Image (spheres, rainbow, N blue to C red):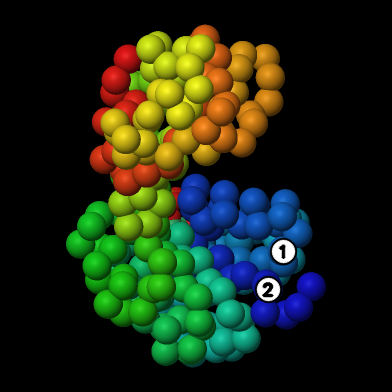
Amino acid sequence: MAENENVVVIGLGRFGGQVAESLLRLGHEVLGIDEDAGIVQRWSDELTHVVQADATDEDALLQVGVQEFTRAVVGIGDDIEASVLTVLALSELGVRDIWAKAISVKHGKILRSVGAHHVIYPEAEMGERVAHLITSRMLDFIELDDGFAIAKTRAPRDTAGRTLAEAGLRATYGVTVVGVKAQGTDFVFAAPETVVPGNGVLIVAGTTEQVQRFAATT
Ligand code: ADP
């Protein structure tokens, strides 16, 4: 693997730890950094390299060689000052792809202003997702950037037995059906002549608002 595909993960708490573990599973090498000696000890068998350091200290990061990495993930959340100073240090070291976890919208804004390229709100995003799943026909929901979403939803009852062209879901709701699935079968790509089965499941794409409105109908 090329050197620049390795990832540095700073703050090996619940979020950072999960990111590190998943990266390893995907075959990437991970440099973990945490200021807590106990946490560093716990990760020392699993990660390629794990170092105890205060990530807000640019010199400490330089010594560890963080400037060699293209990608960094900052999992420090609760200590906002440490999270902001760490992103700033990474930015000043020239790390080109900085991902950082935020615990509030204001925190996220600050992270962006000091150099984070991607801000993640794990609790807010998961909370919103769960709210959609428990209040509508949605079975799965992913909101992409810029208010665009993809959802797996049960098909509205009145579409059963009709083709997608007849059902006219794009005209009515603005959503594009991407895939159609009958119970016990695999998804097929949607075509105008695809028939929606009874109790079928659809994958639809559209703006978040369109997808939500569509999934709220019965
Ligand atoms: P989570 O909710 O995902 O567990 P936390 O904010 O509780 O997130 O955990 C963040 C981790 O970041 C902890 O393991 C903590 O030791 C580490 N951490 C906090 N500040 C620093 C810092 N300045 N340098 C390095 N690691 C830090």
Disc 1 target residue: 28
User: Label 2: few (<14), some or many (≥20) within 10 Å?
Assistant: few
Of 96 and 196, nearer the camera is 196
Asked if marks 2 and 1 touch (Cβ < 8 Å), the reply is yes
Q: Residue at x 32, y 46 (%)?
A: 207
Q: Quadrant of residue 136?
A: top left
Q: Residues within 10 Å of mark 1 (few under 14, many from 20)?
A: some
Residue corresponding to mark 2: 5
Residue 109, by quadrant, is bottom left
- Local SS, label 1: loop
Q: Is residue 78 above or below residue 14?
A: below
Front one among 125 and 16: 125
- The type of residue carrying mark 1 is His
Residue 63 to residue 113: above or below = below
Q: Is residue 63 above or below residue 132?
A: below
- In the image, taking residue 213 as reference, residue 55 lies left or right, namely right
Residue under the point 36% across and 50% down: 148
Whether residue 164 is situated above or below residue 205 in the rendered picture: above
